[in-house]
Image: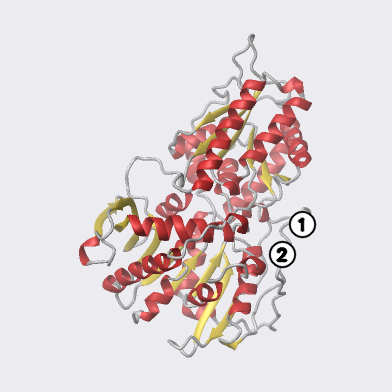
Amino acid sequence: MSRLIALSNRVKVLDNKPMAGGLAVALQNVLIGNSVVWMGWNGKVVKSGDNANGSTGSFTSQPASLTGEGTCITYMTTALTTEQYNQFYCGFANNVLWPLLHERIDLISQKSQDYAGYQDVNQLFAKQLKKIIKPDDVIWVHDYHFLSVAYHCRQLGITNRIGFFLHIPFASLRFWQSLEQSSEVINHLAHYDLLGTQTQQDRTHCLNVLQYYLKYYFIHDQLVASAPINVLDMKRNFAQPYTYTRAKMTLDLALKPQHTLMVDAYPIGVNVAQIQEQVSHLPLKSSLGSTNSNQNREHTFQQIIAVDRIDYSKGLLKRFAAYDDFLAKNPSYQNRLQLLQVACPSRLDLPTYQSLYDDVKKEVYDINQQYLSENSNWQAINYSETALSHEKLMTMFWQSDVGWVNSLKDGMNLVAKEYIAAQNPDNPGVLLLSRYAGAAEQMQAAVIIDPHQPQSMIEGLKMALTMPLEERQSRYRSLLQGLQKDNLQIWQQSFLDDLYNESSSQISSMEPANVQMSDS
């Protein structure tokens, strides 16, 4: 019987502990089938030499049945050695690929051994896949940590279908051209059968990059695709179904003379029904005293919520600066408006992240001190680093008048989608959404802002806080309709349908259209 083998950097085992990483949580919700193996890093770092060679004992299997779902997931995890952690995870993955793919090449920091360490870990997981693979198994690899796994699998003789999904943005060509190893990495990426991106813009960037670096490998270089979507077009209604065809290329990669690679966009969604069930019991009055039955919230205590991992891609400091300016220019909101910032520290072993963490803490303190009053215990920013359960977080979304996503660059940003799914239909809050978050491609009924333009954030926030009930309801209905159409299960189904069904990657009989290429 065919198994699905999922590979991601982190694995979310069945327990009651909350986890900040959205990828692992999302995967836990969709890996439902008759037989699933979920492979990845267990989060532990051990002394160098303990499992560096991928020996038989380095991976631990932990079967777990999901009662009522007919599913048995086998968790197959390994620790990383100190050397692997420093070179693979901290080094090439997060000091090189992460800033590159988020178009922050000024933050790239690479040591000479990091790329070799990245390849060693990709090969380590390929070797483990080789040990457990069965002829009918299908492999689904996730995210930038494993761009080269398919290449190493092919070198080991694995011919099974292998798909790859990138959860973060795919940078445009000019950024890839700044990296010495790009040619080899893209060649490795081409050994997958299916490449999935979050958005149409990312898909277009991916096709541009593949065509540039693989031009000498093409057997057929005519791609079937629609014209790329302008994701910054504020007038487009992305709640409507996409109309585009698949892109397919045939490559000579030596291992297989006729290797077929398909590239498509699969925007990840959320489990709308589950979220709505989590908030269905909540009273209309929030714990902060804001009465959610009011038609206008302008004269009540209002709460803005922002939930981010502390990363330079999330625009936290720009949010704080804009919020500070808003309070200064609109003093009537002082003492009756609060920004609830849930911030999860991460990657503090990297100097860039430690510095950002320190800046975030200082900025929150400075703003709160600025508005400190002897006559009130009001704080402008309520800051928390506590990891919350999903249900608790959805409750806080329900209670908040504005959800603020301020990404400077983001693959999707599921917080934006979860915030809308958790709203009270009778009196919904307003989503303030950065145009640079992948979610903006689908969620144009949000209040779209540009975090690089302070005035855009200030005007957007004022609009969200004063928006009449009828308009809030209309925007909410439009956004919810889109979330229900492209939910988490549809994302899984559409990707796996293409991965399992080899015939689905055949070129459409429609007249081919050349992809519009650009290096911007």
Percent across and percent down for residue 487 are 54, 54
Residue beneath disc 2: 229
Q: Quadrant of residue 104?
A: bottom right
Residue drawn at (70%, 20%), measured in percent from left and top?
Answer: 334
Is 432 displayed left or right of 148 in the figure? Answer: right
Q: Position of residue 449 (x, y in %)?
A: 73, 45
* In the depicted structure, whether residue 316 falls above or below residue 293: below
The image shows residue 218, relative to residue 75, as above or below, that is below
Q: Which residue is mark 1?
A: 233
Observer-nearest residue: 361 or 226?
Answer: 361
Q: Count neighbours of disc 1 (C-alpha within 10 A) and say few if under 14, some if 14 to 19, many if 20 or more.
A: few
Q: How many marks?
A: 2
Asked whether, in this view, residue 499 is left or right of residue 405, the answer is left
Q: Secondary structure at mark 2?
A: loop
User: In terms of secondary structure, where does tag 1 sit?
Assistant: loop
The spot of residue 421 in percent (x, y) is 57, 43
Q: Is residue 143 visible?
A: no
Question: Which picture quadrant has residue 265?
Answer: bottom right
Q: Are circles 2 and 1 on residues that touch, CB within 8 Å? A: yes
How busy is the neighbourhood of tag 2: few (under 14 within 10 Å), some, or many (20 plus)?
some
Q: Quadrant of the N terminus?
A: bottom left
Q: Would residue 261 be visible to someone looking at this image?
A: yes
**Dot 2 amino acid type:** Ile
Question: Is 296 in front, or is 457?
Answer: 457
Quadrant holding the C terminus: bottom right
User: Hey, what amino acid is under mark 1?
Assistant: Asp
